[in-house]
Amino acid sequence: MWVSFTIMTIIEIFLIVFALFFVVQFFNILFRGFAPYVSTRSEVINKIVNELDVKEGATVYELGCGKAGFLKAIEEKFPKAKLIGIEYSFWPYFVAKLQLSLTESKIKIIKKNIFKVNLSDANEIYCYLNRRTMERIEKKFEDECKIGTEIISYQFPLPTKQPAKIIEVNKNHKVYFYNL
């Protein structure tokens, strides 16, 4: 009887936490303009990584990194790069930190709003955000990033910049490459 009660209590707590997570996500997306948590598919990441030539010691950011799939692929191909993921939502941040702690990865994950992170040391920045966020972040890129910084955006272009290159993943999916 006691074991049954304990298991039910644990399940109820889990369901409450799970529901709370989705309420917070919904609020952040609807009212604060955050991008939803959607991972970039591995086929897309592989196409992007194959287009890059990350120099030894370069600093690579993934904004809204989720589980840091892009950074993991970069680390595999360019092990000498400095890799930083920025994630504001607790659950993806927690999962990424947990997964990376179980490996010998040197990826650093920071739980912070992407608009409050200084990007002046970035050589490469990858983001899969949303149209509204890309409109807001374009000025931040212009103000903080050094000349030569490469911005890679999946699906959502910067509104006033002309991409240096566009890759079509398939008929409806594009990757935009910008050189500042």
Image (tube, rainbow, N blue to C red):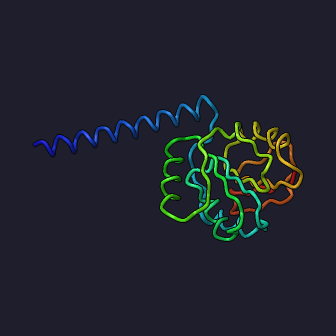
Residue at x 65%, y 65% (from the top left corner): 75
Quarter the N terminus occupies: top left
Residue occupying the far top of the picture:
31
**Image quarter for residue 67?**
bottom right
The answer to which quarter of the image holds residue 116 is top right
Camera-nearest residue between 84 and 125: 84
Percent position (x, y) of residue 163? Answer: 85, 54
Q: Residue furthest left?
A: 1
Q: Is residue 129 visible?
A: yes
Image-based side of 135 in relation to 45, left or right: right
Q: Nearer the viewer, residue 20 or 163?
A: 20
In this figure, what is the number of numbered marks?
0
Image coords of residue 106 (percent x, y) = 61, 61
Percent of width and height locating residue 48: 71, 64
Give the image location of residue 64, x and y in percent.
63, 47
Question: Residue placed at 76% from the left, 40% from the top?
Answer: 137
Q: Is residue 50 above or below residue 14?
A: below
- What residue lies at 57% left-to-right and 50% top-to-bottom? 66
At 61% across and 58% down in the image, what residue appears? 107
Residue 52 visible here: no
